[in-house]
Amino acid sequence: MPSFLNQHSLLKNMSIAEKKIMKILKQNNIEVEVYEHEPVYTCEQAARVRGVAPNEGIKCLLLKSERGFVLAITRGDLRLNLKKLAKLENTKKLRFANEDEIEKIAECQKGCVHPFCNVKTYFDSILLSNETIEFNPGSHTKSVRIRIRDLLKLLNKPIIEHIS
């Protein structure tokens, strides 16, 4: 079961991505729940340790086309439809970012990409049926629960499409 963090313990040992995300949340007065848990590397593992259904978490997938990077955000229990995303991007070449690219763009490791990558973002419309969602804030050992409407306010003009 995850343990909830207080403000003091939250600030210790945070990655660059975590610090940036927590700063964004604080500056915008967004209420979230942040908790610590054992390391997770898949959406299924994250749902298990969070004690929630897989459809309550999101996965953030960083991809690259010939024009640059895009972020796809969908529910943790669904598969991204790469063909549909490539069509939306008007490209035939769309691939998942490698570990070096993830570290450069998201400032975190593979498996804990977060929604705040400052690249063109596709937000799966199916997520709009959730009131809240959970994501890893650039850490394998922490999770954030946030209201969907608050997350959408923070993202830079996400493109809302059915991408799963």
Image: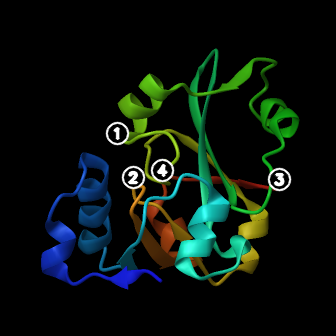
Residue that numbered label 1 is attached to: 107
Report whether residue 34 is seen.
yes
- Distance (Cα) linking label 3 and label 1: 25 Å
Residue that numbered label 3 is attached to: 164
Q: Secondary structure at mark 2?
A: loop
The amino acid marked with disc number 4 is: Cys
- Distance (Cα) linking label 4 and label 2: 5 Å
Instruction: Decide which of tag 1 and tag 2 comes sooner along the chain.
Output: 1
Q: Are marks 1 and 4 in contact (CB under 8 Å)?
A: no
Instruction: Decide which of tag 2 and tag 3 comes sooner along the chain.
Output: 2
> In terms of depth relative to the viewer, which is nearer, 74 or 39?
39
| Percent of width and height locating residue 26 | 25, 73
Q: Residues within 10 Å of mark 3 (few under 14, many from 20)?
A: some
> In terms of depth relative to the viewer, which is nearer, 49 or 104?
49
The amino acid marked with disc number 1 is: Glu
| Percent of width and height locating residue 102 | 46, 33
Q: Residue at x 70, y 79 (%)?
A: 53
Residue that numbered label 2 is attached to: 138
Q: Secondary structure at mark 3?
A: loop
Residue that numbered label 4 is attached to: 112
Q: Nearer the viewer, mark 1 or mark 4?
A: 4
